[in-house]
Image (cartoon, rainbow, N blue to C red):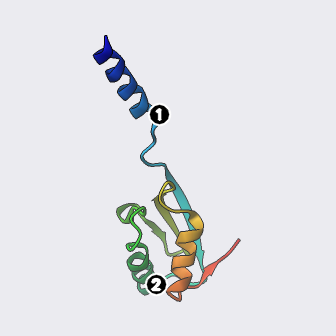
Amino acid sequence: MKKLIVITFAALSLLGCRREDIKTCHVDFETLDEEIAKKSLIALSEFGGVRIDSVKLDFNNKTMEIEYDSMMLAKENIRQKLEENEIKIIRK
């Protein structure tokens, strides 16, 4: 009986814990070319919560779509990191 209670408690606690919460951050750039895109990806790769392999670039509209784990960082962290690396983004 004691073992059943422990197993039940463990199972319920695992179900209630979120380990990640994937969200999307849209960033608009003043200009976006391959050099800026590469510089941006290098800057963002320093974050553990950014999914670099899922970044979507739109050179025509000068936008980047970034998937990130909101349990590890916020949208503002992403924008600040780009600006710290002298990448000009448009704040809305």
Mark 1 crowd level (few <14, some 14–19, many ≥20, 10 Å Cα):
few
Inter-mark Cα distance, 1 to 2: 40 Å
Amino acid bearing label 2: Ile
In this picture, is 75 found above or below 28? above
Q: Contact (CB < 8 A) between labels 1 and 2?
A: no
Which of the numbered marks, if any, corresponds to residue 16?
1
Nearer the observer, 71 or 32: 71
**Residue 69 in picture, x, y percent from top left:** 46, 56
Check disc 2 and report the residue beneath it: 36
Which residue is at a point 53% across and 57% down the rendered structure image? Answer: 24
Q: Extreme right residue here?
A: 92
Q: Is residue 61 visible?
A: no
**Residue 80 in picture, x, y percent from top left:** 57, 77
Q: Which circle, 1 or 2, is nearer the viewer? A: 1
Nearer the observer, 89 or 58: 89
Tell me where residue 83 sits by quadrant: bottom right
Q: Extreme bottom residue here?
A: 86
**Residue 2 in picture, x, y percent from top left:** 32, 15
